[in-house]
């Protein structure tokens, strides 16, 4: 039996999908049924990712695929430890899995990712006619008890400035500024090339955004200067060099450590960028466009400070009517 391709890069997702899609239906059924029977986690991950890459309405990113892999492996281990059949799961299988996740203190947002991956896995098993089970249908995570915009506090401007001062060379500085001022995700930073940057027009193009979307980003003066300095000595076609997205995040973490700034994660820098855009414009549409969100409501999560609210409160509500 030929080995299944595994998840390595975004391109390997297409290889996984092609492998499953080109199998004869009977062979595909046998392979998937055997994997489910034997609780073969990696094979089931491959099946689910292949199916989602072929049939999902939204493009599956490497980042999302990696999260789904972790979630599916966790589900399979849990089922295996209880000798629960994945082909004929009990009626409360899905709810028991959610209960298990909640007892592990998983947040509602984490539970939602686990549910999405589980639904994808069983959709794939139904696709190959290995089961008719829908154990996660109509199951949802509990509502958040914390407002989304309060869950991930951004770095303050003073913290970013301290991290900027701690940068040892233009490469580290550019990584920081692309996140805090440009609002780029770490995978977008990793994939950015000099051919995507026009210093004259002050624009950069994100060609490999979330969901495969492309967007243009207007560059603030700080980012423009940082890129100009780095371009003079950068030896690579890619802006930050041949590094992984994890290394991008680690670079920022080192800066925070040197600067004595609490590490809040890389993504908090995108929240900083959202805050800065909203403070300057007062427009959620501007935040949505700048950060590349597909939905306006997502932009709300990236606006932690409401300067117009502060101004209204400071002016007094009753005094203006006296």
Image (cartoon, rainbow, N blue to C red):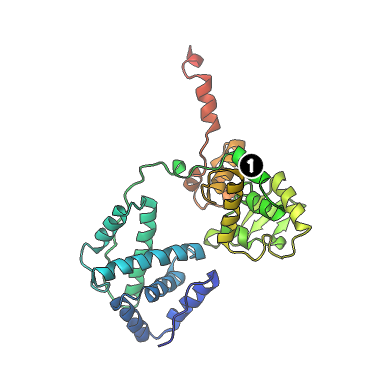
Q: How many marks?
A: 1
Closer to the camera, 202 or 44? 44
Q: Is residue 214 visible?
A: no
Relative image position of residue 166 (x, y in whole percent): 66, 46
Extreme residue toward the left, this view: 91
Residue 117 locus on image (x, y percent): 38, 64
Identify whether 113 is placed above or below 22. above
Please give the residue where the numbered disc 1 appears in the rendered image: 162
Quarter of the picture containing the N terminus is: bottom left
Picture quadrant of residue 187: bottom right
Q: Which quadrant holds residue 67? A: bottom left
- Circle 1 packing at 10 Å, graded few (<14), some (14-19), many (20+), is some
Which residue is painted at 37% across and 56% down in the image? 112
Give 279 or 68, whichever is nearer the viewer. Answer: 68
Going by the picture, which residue comes out furthest to the top?
Answer: 322
Of 257 and 170, nearer the camera is 257
Does residue 126 appear left or right of residue 261 in this picture?
A: left
Residue under the image location 36 percent in, 86 percent down: 27
Q: At which x and y percent is residue 289?
A: 58, 48
Is 36 placed above or below 93 here?
Answer: below
């Amino acid at each position: 039996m030929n080995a299944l391709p595994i998840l390595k890069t975004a391109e390997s997702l297409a290889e996984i999908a092609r492998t499953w899609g080109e199998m004869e239906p009977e062979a595909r059924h046998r392979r998937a049924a055997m994997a489910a029977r034997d609780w073969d986690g990696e094979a089931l991950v491959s099946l689910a990712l292949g199916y989602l890459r072929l049939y999902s309405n939204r493009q599956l990113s490497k980042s999302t695929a990696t999260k789904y892999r972790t979630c599916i492996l966790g589900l399979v281990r849990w089922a295996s430890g209880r000798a629960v059949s994945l082909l004929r799961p009990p009626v409360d299988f899905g709810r028991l899995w959610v209960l298990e996740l909640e007892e592990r203190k998983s947040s509602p947002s984490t539970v939602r990712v686990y549910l999405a991956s589980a639904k994808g896995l069983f959709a794939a098993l139904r696709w190959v006619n290995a089961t008719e089970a829908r154990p996660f249908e109509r199951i949802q995570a509990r509502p958040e008890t914390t407002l989304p915009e309060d869950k991930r506090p951004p770095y303050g401007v003073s913290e970013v400035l301290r991290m900027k001062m701690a940068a040892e060379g233009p490469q580290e500085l550019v990584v920081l500024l692309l996140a805090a001022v440009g609002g780029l995700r770490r995978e977008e930073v990793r994939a950015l090339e000099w051919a995507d940057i026009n210093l004259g027009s002050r624009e950069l193009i994100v060609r490999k955004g979330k969901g495969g979307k492309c967007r243009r980003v207007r560059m603030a003066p700080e980012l423009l200067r940082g890129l100009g300095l780095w371009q003079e000595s950068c030896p690579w076609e890619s802006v930050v060099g041949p590094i992984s997205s994890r290394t991008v995040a680690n670079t920022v973490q080192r800066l925070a450590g040197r600067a004595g700034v609490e590490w809040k994660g890389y993504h908090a820098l995108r929240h900083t960028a959202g805050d800065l855009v909203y403070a300057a414009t007062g427009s959620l549409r501007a935040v949505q466009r700048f950060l590349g969100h597909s939905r306006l409501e997502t932009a709300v999560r990236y606006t932690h400070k409401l300067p117009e609210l502060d101004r209204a409160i400071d002016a007094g509500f009753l005094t203006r009517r006296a």
